[in-house]
């Protein structure tokens, strides 16, 4: 059993890690994952009320005031079921139902507003003391430096300290009562009170001031990143109009079933995946795949949930329930990605366990040994206090996962789904990207790309003859020629006699003439000479002959996607080696490879041969990403360091992939690589900068040159810079 809980009043990322570790040790818990930015806990195991009580007790001991609660479930599902079956809810008439539903919405609105006002009051309750504290601190600082009123400045420093640090003192008191020592609040309290005792009033207040500012920056950064992540979840539609017993009724989207007919009005968001049943309109797909240009849809076209209908009302036959539709999968994948921890994050978590004890022990040793050697106890205790200020690793514990969290948010806005922070981390280390051809670099659908005629016959005439012959066949090549004829308004003839010639093509008798349409082997078997048609091109060649005379040839091929060439070029400019491995024949693969400028091309490969080639590239170049879309690509996707799949591909490929590209364009691969590189770069910057500054403060303190202001910068100042640096990952140039 797996269950999700919300975590309230959790303010420390380091404490969040301790809570996750403690819950994982409880009996009945198989795995617990705490998502700090989303304030969400996912538990797999025996999720009983007793376990919830145990988790709350544990969390309260680690950080006072933390509450773990079950998510509230909506109450409108019951009436929705009655509507589907055309019943009146609980013997009330329809009018009363409507009033009750309206009243419920009204109450919810009022409740939301009152909650909002409550937040404003709480915000004012925190913000006003903060502003007053800064004013009093500034006044105290001025009096202390420019007048002789030392007692007044000391009192004002004390008032400023209480105004700015009362929440730290309260949290410390609660934690001591719960038996929890050595958290950031306790260490901050000891350091600041110690500074007051030593007469360093300005430093003491400065510590809590910058600590408070750091908290504000943290809340801002987490809020921005959370918005980027939860934007996908907000695309879900609560209600939809479903055709029931001949009329459209509004039901909860959870009740939508496969095969239902939905009515989508202008301005509405689509609740479930489906196929347009009737009507024509334009839809905005940007929220799903990042594509800014609206798409025209008509009868028979596939439509994804989460898109917005921009113009005309149309009906949709669902191909998936709302819970199984694309937007639900996106929301789930993005949330999972924000919870999945990369190796770097796991390293920081392990590092944080030993960092605080080491710094506290160093502080004690510095105070004791320094005093014994020099007898200057004030200096060395002051030095030890500076160590306590930097002893909490919160800046690192939050900033590194926040970078990956922001990277996931940036990716989702660009129509890219990463299945975990580890996928972003791995992609950032990729040295080579290997593509499948069909459906990845090409569109995966056959079209007529070239026509050559002989004997004065026109292209239209050749197409009419070939289309009339090929209409009996269900082969993709034959179907593409029929589609081309339809697009050019070419009316086809019905053959008097026709048939298929296995592995070679078709024949047909039309108006007393016998025509042959097929490959080179068919022409040779009939003794028909094939002229030189000006060089070969990639694709399947269909020769057309009447009796023993060649009339021309039509090439049907898979067209290259519009962004493929540019994507390959950009990847190469980024220093990434490119390769294409395909099951298509080598000749076609070489043509596409030359057109796109791919470094290495291999054709005619079976799935196991693709995997062997990929391993060869890995041993030669380094970590490899494979991007494909077919069922046969699943083994290679799983075998690559990072697997990427086009959303238009097979379900098995999507399941095996670490990243999914929603608009199925190669340009998304470039964006994904840029996001991963930037996220990884920011993470390294955060770690190096934080450790360097903290190490500098420690070295200065040990050498007898302590500075509380530098310690404040090393803690809260560094945290602010690191957090701001992390949210840079939210912005990626397209």
Image: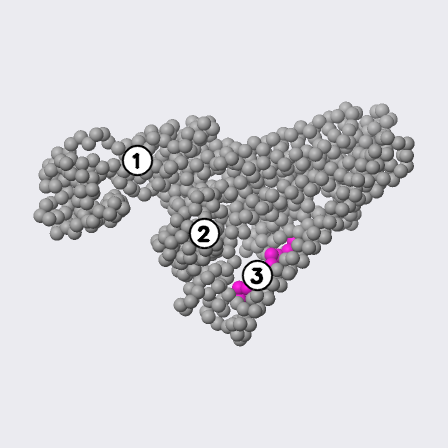
State the image coordinates of residue 153 (x, y, percent, origin top left). 87, 36
User: Along the polypeptide, which appears first: circle 2 or circle 1?
Assistant: 2
Instruction: Tell me: residue 520, above or below residue 125.
Output: above
User: Along the polypeptide, which appears first: circle 2 or circle 3?
Assistant: 3
Q: Which residues are magenta?
A: 65-78
x 63%, y 29%: residue? 688
Was residue 345 drawn as part of the magenta stretch in this picture? no
Disc ID at residue 310: 2
Q: Nearer the viewer, residue 577 or 542?
A: 542
Q: Secondary structure at mark 3?
A: loop
Mark 1 residue crowding within 10 angstroms, few (<14) / some (14–19) / many (20+) = some
In the shown orientation, is residue 386 left or right of residue 506?
right
Q: Secondary structure at mark 1?
A: loop
User: Along the polypeptide, which appears first: circle 1 or circle 3?
Assistant: 3
Q: Circle 1 sits on which residue?
A: 604
Mark 2 residue crowding within 10 angstroms, few (<14) / some (14–19) / many (20+) = some
Residue contact between numbered discs 1 and 3, judged by CB atoms under 8 Å: no
Disc ID at residue 74: 3
State the image coordinates of residue 431 (x, y, percent, origin top left). 46, 30
Residue contact between numbered discs 2 and 3, judged by CB atoms under 8 Å: no
């Amino acid at each position: 059993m797996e269950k999700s809980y919300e975590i309230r009043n959790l303010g420390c990322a380091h404490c969040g890690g301790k809570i996750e570790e403690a819950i994982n040790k409880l009996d009945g818990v198989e795995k617990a994952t705490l998502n700090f930015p989303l304030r969400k806990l996912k538990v797999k195991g025996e999720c009983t009320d007793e376990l919830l009580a145990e988790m709350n007790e544990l969390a309260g001991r680690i950080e006072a005031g933390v509450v773990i609660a079950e998510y509230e479930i909506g109450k409108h599902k019951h009436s929705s079921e009655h509507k589907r079956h055309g019943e009146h809810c609980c013997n009330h008439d329809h009018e009363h139902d409507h009033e009750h539903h309206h009243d419920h919405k009204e109450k919810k609105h009022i409740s939301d507003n009152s909650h909002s006002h409550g937040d404003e009051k709480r915000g004012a309750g925190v913000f006003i003391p903060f502003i007053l504290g800064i004013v009093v601190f500034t006044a105290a600082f001025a009096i202390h430096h420019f007048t002789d009123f030392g007692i007044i400045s000391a009192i004002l420093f004390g008032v400023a300290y209480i105004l700015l640090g009362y929440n730290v003192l309260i949290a410390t008191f609660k934690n001591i009562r719960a038996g929890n020592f050595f958290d950031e609040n306790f260490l901050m309290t000891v350091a600041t009170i110690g500074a007051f005792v030593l007469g360093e009033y300005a430093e003491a207040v400065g510590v809590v001031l910058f600590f408070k500012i750091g908290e504000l920056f943290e809340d801002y950064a987490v809020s921005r990143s959370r918005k980027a992540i939860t934007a996908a979840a907000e695309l879900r539609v609560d209600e939809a109009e479903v055709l029931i017993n001949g009329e459209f009724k509004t039901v909860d989207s959870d009740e939508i079933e496969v095969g239902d007919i939905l009515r989508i009005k202008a301005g509405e968001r689509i609740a479930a995946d489906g196929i347009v049943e009737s009507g024509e309109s334009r839809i905005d797909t940007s929220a799903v795949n990042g594509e800014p240009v609206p798409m025209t849809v008509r009868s028979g076209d596939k439509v994804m949930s989460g898109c917005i209908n921009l113009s005309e009302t149309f009906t949709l036959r669902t191909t998936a329930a709302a819970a199984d539709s694309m937007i639900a999968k996106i929301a789930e994948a993005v949330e999972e990605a924000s919870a999945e921890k990369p190796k770097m994050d796991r390293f920081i978590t392990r590092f944080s366990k030993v960092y605080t004890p080491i710094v506290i022990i160093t502080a004690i040793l510095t105070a004791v040994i320094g005093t014994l050697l020099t007898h200057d106890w004030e200096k060395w205790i002051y030095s030890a206090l500076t160590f306590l200020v930097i002893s909490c690793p919160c800046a690192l514990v939050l900033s590194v996962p926040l970078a990956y969290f922001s990277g996931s948010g940036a990716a989702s806005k660009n129509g890219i789904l990463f299945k975990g922070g580890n996928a972003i981390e791995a992609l950032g280390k990729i040295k080579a990207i290997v593509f499948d051809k069909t459906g990845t670099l090409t569109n995966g659908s056959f079209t007529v790309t070239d026509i050559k005629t002989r004997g004065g016959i026109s292209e239209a005439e050749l197409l009419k003859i070939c289309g009339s012959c090929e209409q009996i066949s269900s082969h993709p090549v034959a179907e593409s020629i029929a589609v081309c004829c339809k697009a050019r308004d070419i009316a086809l003839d019905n053959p008097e006699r026709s048939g298929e010639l296995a592995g070679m093509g078709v024949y047909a008798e039309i108006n007393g003439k016998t025509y042959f349409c097929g490959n080179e082997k068919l022409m040779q078997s009939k003794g028909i000479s094939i002229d030189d048609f000006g060089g070969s091109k990639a694709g399947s060649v269909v020769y057309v002959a009447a009796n023993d005379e060649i009339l021309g040839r039509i090439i049907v091929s898979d067209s290259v996607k519009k962004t493929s060439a540019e994507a390959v070029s950009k990847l190469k400019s980024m220093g990434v080696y490119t390769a294409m491995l395909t099951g298509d024949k080598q000749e076609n693969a070489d043509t596409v490879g030359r057109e796109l400028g791919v470094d290495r091309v291999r054709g005619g490969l079976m799935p196991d041969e693709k995997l062997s080639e990929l391993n060869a590239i890995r041993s030669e170049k380094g970590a490899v990403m494979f991007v494909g879309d077919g069922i046969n690509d699943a083994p290679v996707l799983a075998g690559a360091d990072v697997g990427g799949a086009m959303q238009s591909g097979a379900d098995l490929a999507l399941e095996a992939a670490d990243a999914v590209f929603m608009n199925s364009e190669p340009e998304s691969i470039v964006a994904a690589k840029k996001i991963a590189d930037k996220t990884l770069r920011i993470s390294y910057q955060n770690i190096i900068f934080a450790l360097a500054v903290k190490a500098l403060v420690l070295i200065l303190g040990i050498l007898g040159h302590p500075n509380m202001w530098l310690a404040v910068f090393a803690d809260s100042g560094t945290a602010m810079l690191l957090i701001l640096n992390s949210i840079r990952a939210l912005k990626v140039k397209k």
